[in-house]
Amino acid sequence: MKKIAGYFGVALLLLSSCAKKNNSTFQATAIIEGTAIKVSAQTGGYLLKVNVEEGQDVGSGDTLAVVDAEKLGYQLNQMEANLDELNVQHRLATTNLRRAQEDYDYAKTKYERYLDLFKKNAASQQVLDDLKITHDRASTALESARQNLQSISSREKGLAAQMKLLQRQINDAMVTAPISGTVTTRFYDAGETIPPNAPLVEIVDLAKMWAKVYVSETYLPQIKIGQNAQVQIDGTTQTFTGTVAWISAKAEFTPKNILTQESRTALVYAVKISIDNPDHVLKHGMPVTISL
């Protein structure tokens, strides 16, 4: 009986140990990140001014910088003048087409009338031949007028498309913030000449941060989408509440910059924690401890 009692006690101890393991809290160190966007100046040229400094908060749509677009404005004015000229040519070509159509209709009617008389032996061959030549010339003139009008219309469309592209470049010369956030890096200063599509500033959205931790299959069943997570800034007692936003469906080897050499060969699952940061206390690149 004493042996049975002893075995029973050991079994209870093992079960208690397993229960503690299964209900244990997962903790990991992670790096806080925010959505970082490098805002580019799509229109290159002389940088007239930069309105922001590093560390400054900006709102979506705020003007970050202005590129000199004076030359582009001159080009647009020239294109507008060319389009006005094409519009005049279009009206003339339309008038010519209408006249060519009238001449053709007249020549065709007259030719068909004399052809009918010729078949009745009421008209000469010479007159019919002359009318056939006139008819053919009118037909050629009509086709030429149509092609001329079509050519002018195509040039108008092409020039209008070029003007839209040029206007877009002028609009892009005023660089605006695509999101609200904090300017972390400024790559150019006013007075410099920048190439097209060059990154001008980097903006990080600090209001909504996230961190990624790597969980082994031992702890994975305890973690669910929407589950709360405690986020503590290293070296302080200040904590934030995060939410499990995403769990990888595929195992991967532990990244080389995570944990110890031995654990790098272990298969883990990436878990993304979303953290609200309205007061911008958390910073991009800040180390934290995450508990799940």
Image: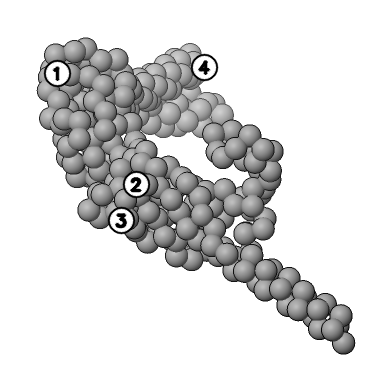
State the CA–CA distance, disc 1 to disc 3. 40 Å
The first of marks 2 and 4 along the sequence is 4
Q: Is residue 97 above or below residue 265?
A: above
- 3 or 4: mark nearer the eye: 3
Which residue matches tag 2? 235
The quadrant of the rendering that contains the N terminus is bottom right
- Residue 125, numbered label: 4
Horizontal side of residue 29 vs 104, given as left or right: right
Q: Which three-letter amino acid code belongs to the residue tagged 1?
A: Ala
Q: Which three-letter amino acid code belongs to the residue tagged 4?
A: Gln
Q: Residue at x 25, y 15 (%)?
A: 194
- Residue 289, numbered label: none
Query: Which image quarter: residue 106?
Result: top left
SS for tag 1? loop
Q: Which three-letter amino acid code belongs to the residue tagged 3?
A: Gln
- Residue 253 at x, y = what percent? 66, 40
Q: Nearer the viewer, residue 265 or 20?
A: 20
- 1 or 2: mark nearer the eye: 2
| Residue occupying the far bottom of the picture | 1
Q: Is residue 95 visible?
A: no
Specify how the rendered protein is coloured.
one colour
Q: Are marks 1 and 2 in contact (CB under 8 Å)?
A: no
- 1 or 3: mark nearer the eye: 3
